[in-house]
Image (cartoon, rainbow, N blue to C red):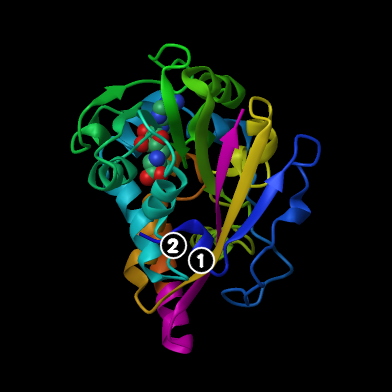
Amino acid sequence: MVPARSQGPVNRCQVSNEARTSASMFAMPAPTPPLRPLSGAEPVTSNTAQQDAAITDRDRLAHSAYADSQHLAARQSLYRWQQPQYDLPGMITAELERVRGTVLDIGCGNGRFVTRLHQQRPDLRVIGTDISAGILADVPRPVAVADAQVLPFSDDSADAALALHMLYHVPDIPVSVAELARVVKSDGLVIASTNGRHDKRELDLLWSRAAADVLGVAEGPSRVSLSARFSLELAPALLGAAFSDVHVIELPGAIETPDPGPVVAHLASYEAWADQLGVPFRPTLVRAEELVTQEIAKHGTFRITCLGGILVCRR
Ligand SMILES: C[S@@+](CC[C@H](N)C(=O)[O-])C[C@H]1O[C@@H](n2cnc3c(N)ncnc32)[C@H](O)[C@@H]1O
């Protein structure tokens, strides 16, 4: 377990209610050279209204994107190549050090955090919830199928709640934030996490480049951004509506892999949104694999800059 405070590049910022929207408080990783020379194009991580609707569509989430853990696991496994390594379950466990009683993990996915808490904090009552019954199959019990906008828990019934890399999928984020505040006791803790808006921009660039080649155009369409609606830059203000104290822990880093496999698997994990990409999905993956393979042959690795973050919230 690696406590948050012992990790070198971690940046912690206290965000007041007044100042929490300032993007300048987030130290961005140093820019890396593009995959190959571009005409000034910066990957775009904003979505159309239709793409946002697809990212929050309950049926698509429960029965396709997160019907099981396959796509989520592909995205999680890319972090094996990240430096520095962040033990996120260990960091969350450390943040919960003083918490006793009941912890809810809302949108717990394949149970990475629930499992760690069961192992390291057997004294806690940990309940995993998710909108997808399928992804809960292997999560330690108790679990519940539930929408984060209508939590099946009474007021002040939990001592802490987690909403990790999930609020960007919720149609009404303010309603869900209010639900988190409602179910957690007034002296309790809510911990959210998400990515910065430039996180993994080289993957966005790779996708656009591959899409351009498939379509035979100079600049391909952007892929959808999953976290744009609740990016690390937007999250403090959204959480600040219900919590007076939002503490941001930035997690900058870079993934460098000599293997095209995990990069292509990450791109392939967006299959549930293939109809939102404006380009044939499989041929674009094939072209992306060729481009990454060329890049690795030239430079030895493919490099992806990352910025994730944890937000520790108190009322
Ligand atoms: C990117 S995964 C994150 C999983 C896990 N929290 C983690 O960090 O590893 C997002 C999860 O949120 C779930 N989800 C999406 N919308 C939801 C909603 N409205 N209510 C509850 N869960 C939801 C998805 O089914 C998926 O399992």
Tell me: residue 290, above or below residue 145: below
Magenta span covers which residues? 291-315
Taking the magenta stretch, the answer to whether it contains residue 1 is no
Image quarter (top left, top right, bottom left or bottom right) of the C terminus: top right
Q: Amino acid at mark 1?
A: Gln
In the structure shown, which secondary structural element does the residue marked by tag 1 occupy? Answer: loop
Q: Position of residue 258 (x, y in %)?
A: 37, 79
Q: Nearer the viewer, mark 1 or mark 2?
A: 1
Q: CA distance from mark 1 to mark 2?
A: 8 Å
Tell me: residue 167, above or below residue 206: above
How packed mark 1 is, by other alpha carbons closer than 10 Å (few <14, some 14-19, many 20 or more), is some
Of the image marks 1 and 2, the number of the one nearer the N terminus:
1
Tell me: residue 161, above or below residue 97: above
Q: Amino acid at mark 2?
A: Tyr
Quadrant containing ligand 1: top left
Q: Position of residue 22 (x, y in %)?
A: 78, 47
Quick check: can you spot residue 209?
Answer: no
- Pointer 1 residue: 7
In the displayed image of the protein, which residue is found farthest to the top? 154
Q: Quadrant of residue 11?
A: bottom right
Q: Are marks 1 and 2 in contact (CB under 8 Å)?
A: yes
Which mark, by number, is residue 86? 2
What residue is shown at x 65% (from left), y 44% (from top)?
A: 46
